[in-house]
Amino acid sequence: MTYAHITGWGMAVPERVLTNQDLEKMVDTSDEWIISRTGIKERRIASDNETTASLAIQAALKALKVSNITPAEVELIIVATSSPEYIFPATASIVQDQLGAVRAGAFDILAACSGFIYALNMATQAIRSGSAQNALVIGSETLSRIVDWTDRNTCVLFGDGAGAFILQAGEQRAGLLSATMRSDGSGGDLLWLPGGGSRFPTSADTVNQGLHFVKMNGREVFRFATRVMVKSTQEVVRKAQLSMDDIDVVIPHQANKRIIESAIRSLNIPMDRCVLNIDRFGNTSTASIPIATCEAIAEGRLNPGDHTVFVGFGAGLTWGAAVVRWSGPFPGLYVMRPPVYHFYARIRSILKRILRKIDAIIWGRYHPDN
Ligand code: ACO
């Protein structure tokens, strides 16, 4: 049987830090309120030249380096994001081009904060079925671009960042062992970004009404989250034929420290087995689980042979969980140099655009607006 081992990982966060004290100067809030209600002390905010794709590419390059494979070996790229570069093309296609992943199919998943678990499961299934040998799964966000910085109910919660995993086919029992993906669309209006889609296409009115910003009913999302985190964790542990005692590390979506503590308590798991970094990054949506994973590995908390649970929830409503048996990189034959591949991929991309233009000029198809 083929398994999808996680053989590479990487994270990228903007340098700019926005503290609770900074937020006190922007909206009617306090450091004490934010810490006691959410556990967040600071979050990272993208600079003008950072985007969802650029953070995704930085995280992906680090993951490729760890797994020691070249971009040309990647056959599938899935980017989970709630703040895509554009509605289309997919952020995954931009990543594919800028990495030079010339053999990869690429698409985005829109499942809000559960998106990374959905993407991990989809990529695992592609590898298990034999349709891909190597896949790149990314969660990347610039939520700061879709948050209303005058709305204290939401702006204190979110941050920017990206995390990436490389998945590779392997014969040993490792990687994702079980997963669940669920949705309850009746709660769609509890957390949403109404404007800019088919229902409320962009107009002066939608802009004036603030429909292009995240809207949230925090209390209802809180109640939903604590319930589904427990249920879905229990479900995937059972499906993997393990018990809670077999779980070495829980890596939950970092939305609110109180939600996480309540869920971990209900699961009877000691808190020291749970990875928490919300204090430094806030809620980075799809990026929070891979970022927390990278930190857990760097701190020596997640090692080959360990069983970990990823569990998350988000807008949709959606939720999901997965049990992963950790393995680590396969022995590599060569030394992968991500910046070199990235450099050649950018040149290649520019040359392809120029050639496409020359071809259009020669055959009379050229129009300066296209
Ligand atoms: N500073 C000070 N006061 C605030 C702030 C703030 N930043 N935000 C809200 N308040 C006020 C409210 O106005 C309210 O005042 P009122 O009672 O006079 O109306 C009061 O604080 C209490 O509000 P509650 O909603 O009861 O506060 P609660 O303890 O529920 O905490 C919070 C609010 C942090 C939003 C919490 O409900 C929560 O975390 N919910 C889950 C949100 C979440 O996880 N969202 C992301 C999902 S993942 C995704 O898809 C992106």
Image: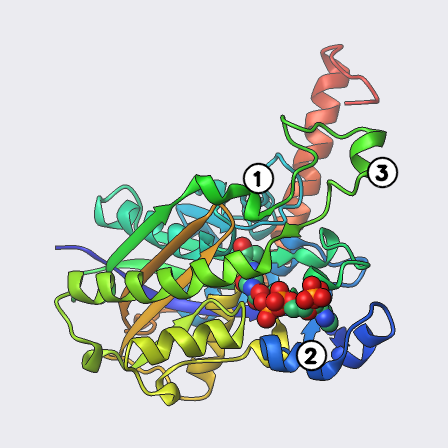
Instruction: Name the residue type under label 2.
Output: Trp
CA gap between label 3 and label 1 equals 27 Å
Q: How is the image coloured?
A: rainbow
Considering only vertical position in the picture, is 342 above or below 300? above
Q: Going by the image, does 176 lie left or right of 30? A: left
In the image, what residue occupies the spot 71% across and 41% down? 350
> Which is nearer the N-term, disc 3 or disc 1?
1
Considering only vertical position in the picture, is 103 above or below 163? above
Which residue position is annotated with label 2? 33
Q: Going by the image, does 150 lie left or right of 243? A: right
Which residue position is annotated with label 1? 90
Q: Going by the image, does 348 lie left or right of 136? A: right
How far across and down, in percent of the image, does residue 338 sit? 55, 64
Are there few (<14), some (14-19), or many (20+) residues within 10 Å of tag 1? many
Which residue position is annotated with label 3? 208
Front-lying residue, 165 or 101:
165
**Residue 321 visible to the viewer:** yes
How far across and down, in percent of the image, does residue 215 sit? 66, 49
CA gap between label 1 and label 2 equals 38 Å
Instruction: Name the residue type under label 1.
Output: Ala
Considering only vertical position in the picture, is 82 above or below 246? above
Instruction: Name the residue type under label 3.
Output: Asn
In the image, what residue occupies the spot 21% across and 67% down? 237
Which residue ends up furthest to the top in the rendered image? 364
Quadrant hosting ligand 1? bottom right
Considering only vertical position in the picture, is 205 above or below 167? above
Q: Is mark 2 within 8 Å of ligand 1?
A: yes
